[in-house]
Image (spheres, rainbow, N blue to C red):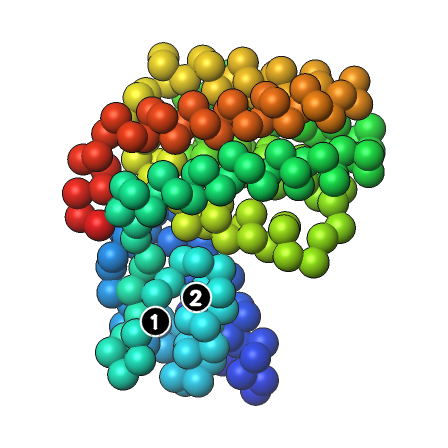
Amino acid sequence: MIPASSRDGSAGTRIATRLREAILTGAYAPGARIRQEDIAEEFGASRLPVREALRILESDGLVTLIANTGAWVSHLSLAECQEMYQIRERIEPLLLRYSLPQLSAETLDRLQELADEMQAGSNVETFLHLDREFHLLSYTGATTSMLGDTVRRLWNSTQHYRRAFTVLIGPDHNQAVHYEHQLLVGALRRGDGEDAERVLSGHIRRTRLELSKHPELFADA
């Protein structure tokens, strides 16, 4: 148990961090109810920091709060997921364009390491963790007031469906993903923003089109 802090904001942030990790790694399924009293007991905290944590997670796109009712892990319908992916297709290449001029040689080397690790591995959770690090790292050169936060929220909202899809297709059918990661690193190393944007847009679009073939992944949404 995490001891409660005398500062509710600090405790709320700490609880949010742990709950965020649990949701993103699939410990909570989409649509699962999150009971404040259970969370307070688990973390040895009062209700106040738990409520603050849930508000943080709501802003992250991970939790849906309904007044006087409770909190649930956010879930998507197929149509909502398709819309989010179409938004991602358009705005993530823009964020990458902003980021590219500021990416250091060390960051580019790390992106290559991540691409190679994903290609060499087969564990779904490891892949999802590395894939998230890879793409979000590629955006770290950008300084934006809204775009970066919007992209992270969209990544959070679609995480469960990426996991379900990755499990469904299996590692043997994931070679196109690895190929695209390698192409993206190559374009970034050349400083070719136009090619990097094209590869990234196609990368996101291909996942969207594949997800559309599997409406059963959204049956509970």
* Residue at x 62% of width, y 34% of height: 93
Chain-order first, disc 1 or disc 2: 2
Figure label count: 2
Q: Is residue 10 left or right of residue 47?
A: right
Q: What percent of the width, then of the height, locates residue 86?
A: 45, 38
Disc 1 residue type (three-letter): Leu
Image mark for residue 114: none
In front of the other: 4 or 93 = 93
Q: Which residue is the site of mark 2?
A: 58
In screen coordinates, is 3 left or right of 212? right
Closer to the camera, 189 or 146?
146
Circles 1 and 2, Cβ within 8 Å, touching? The answer is yes
Q: Residues within 10 Å of mark 1 (few under 14, many from 20)?
A: some
SS for dot 1: strand
Query: What is the quadrant of residue 74 in the picture?
Result: bottom left
Q: What's the residue at 33%, 25% (across, down)?
A: 210
Report, in whole angstroms, how far the alpha carbon at label 1 lies from the one at label 2: 7 Å
Q: Can residue 221 be seen from the camera position used here?
A: yes
- Looking at the picture, which amino acid does disc 2 mark? Glu
Residue found 42% across the figure and 77% down from its top: 50
Question: With respect to residue 21, does 181 lie above or below?
Answer: above
Taking 116 as reference, is 102 above or below it? below
Query: For numbered disc 2, what is the local secondary structure?
Result: helix
From what the image shows, is residue 8 above or below residue 86?
below
Q: How far from the left and from the top, in percent, is residue 54?
A: 42, 71
Given residues 110 and 162, the one toward you in this image is 162
Q: Is residue 117 visible in the rendered structure shown here?
A: no
Task: Report the front residue among 135 and 149.
Answer: 149
Along the horizontal axis of the image, is 110 left or right of 36?
Answer: right
Residue 65's label in the rendered image is: 1
The N terminus, quarter of image: bottom left
Q: Residue at x 74, y 40 (%)?
A: 98
